[in-house]
Image: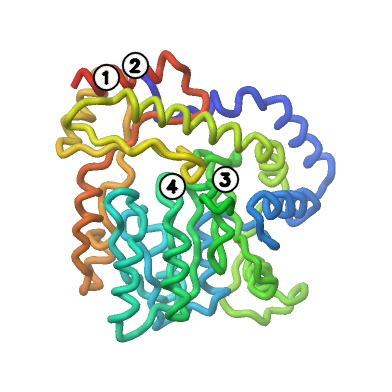
Amino acid sequence: MVPVNDLTRHVGPLRQQLNDVAGQVIASGCFVLGPRTSAFESAFASYCGVEEVVGVANGTDALELALRALGVARGHAVAMVANAGMYGATAALACGATPCYVDVEASSATMDPACLERLLRQTGTRPAAVIVTHLYGRLADMPRLCEVARAYGVPVVEDCAQAHGARGKDGRRAGSYGDVACFSFYPTKNLGALGDGGAVATNDPALAGRVRRLRQYGWSAKYRNELAGGRNSRLDELQAAFLCVMLPLLDGWNARRREIAEAYSRGIVHPRIQVPAVAGEEYTGHLYVVRSADRVGLQAHLARLNVASEVHYPIADTQQTVMARMGGMPALPVTEALCGSVLSLPCFPELDEVEVARVIEACNAW
């Protein structure tokens, strides 16, 4: 089977380095909020081109704490897309806020600036924030989206969980456009730990300070709680040490992912399979996603030829049971069409040329 991802192959070449830094952490006796976390926060901030990075326990916590740091609370609304696995909605609901949904562009599957502007112009209650997701590792149209949001005084939260290292045509990296940005280091991410982890990035020191307090109970000093909404959400020393080993390799991994994606986009020529356009550094190749009106048939065909595939994501937020119960969900025609047709093919840095050729041949043989 050609897998969609293979973490054993991914971390195998780093096993000795990872063992070494794990031993150093164990020997140090410092396991939470120590020097390795600080070192990773500093290195990742420099990499992303931002002033501050705050390590937290996971990507969903990053979104929630970023929203709380912006003042999002019960009774507020948060604008977002509905084709990104409901992670943004989970964070908004945890704050007591209500998700409000924006349709996406068909070409990129990311938030449509025109639809965002329509929402902000027409809504009776202006959203307290907008979460922009860089889906599949492809940068959304951040210059235009930021322009629209700021014209209405709405802060922008970048969801960069799939876009570590993506770079716009202006040279800026994912995470440096919005008022605040959120990352996940779940093991399957382009920059993944060996467990859970996340981070919040920003150029606003006051915002970073609020996130630092929120990640540790809302403390302003030890045992002194002054900020509501705090929790225990800290990137531990072991995961920070692993991430410090992996960060220098990220650009090379992303380049290999783009090579594989380009081979697919040039080699898959089946008329019933729509492939994404060849892309530059604005795309990290986190997921390589094709579209087909007969996704079920294509997926079954690939399985018979021992090529794995997955669906990211099959159900729009607006059609999830928990959201449908709330009522008032909008029609999102582009989002709903994508949820019914997208299929992710194998794409990870260690995929070899024989496997890439097998995937292309299997698609074209359908």
Q: Amino acid at mark 3?
A: Gly
- For the residues labelled 3 and 4, say whether their Cβ atoms are less than 8 Å apart: no
Q: Position of residue 331 (x, y in %)?
A: 19, 65
- Residue under pointer 2: 358
Q: Position of residue 109 (x, y in %)?
A: 32, 51
Say few, some or many: other residues with alpha carbon within 10 Å of mark 2 (under 14 / 14 to 19 / 20 or more). Answer: some
The answer to whether 279 is drawn above or below residue 95 in the figure is above
Say few, some or many: other residues with alpha carbon within 10 Å of mark 3 (under 14 / 14 to 19 / 20 or more). Answer: many
- Residue under pointer 3: 165
- Residue under pointer 4: 138
Which of the two discs, 1 and 4, labels the residue nearer the N terminus?
Answer: 4
Q: Position of residue 155 (x, y in %)?
A: 50, 74
Q: Which residue shows up at 61% across the image and 23% down it?
A: 12
> Gap in Å between the C-alphas at discs 1 and 2?
6 Å
- For the residues labelled 1 and 2, say whether their Cβ atoms are less than 8 Å apart: yes
Q: Amino acid at mark 1?
A: Ala
- Residue under pointer 1: 362
Q: Who is closer to the viewer here, 275 or 22? A: 275
Question: Is residue 106 toward the left or the right of residue 75 in the image?
Answer: left
Mark 1 or mark 4: which is in front? Answer: 4
Which of the two discs, 2 and 3, labels the residue nearer the N terminus?
Answer: 3
Say few, some or many: other residues with alpha carbon within 10 Å of mark 1 (under 14 / 14 to 19 / 20 or more). Answer: some
| SS at mark 3 in the image | loop
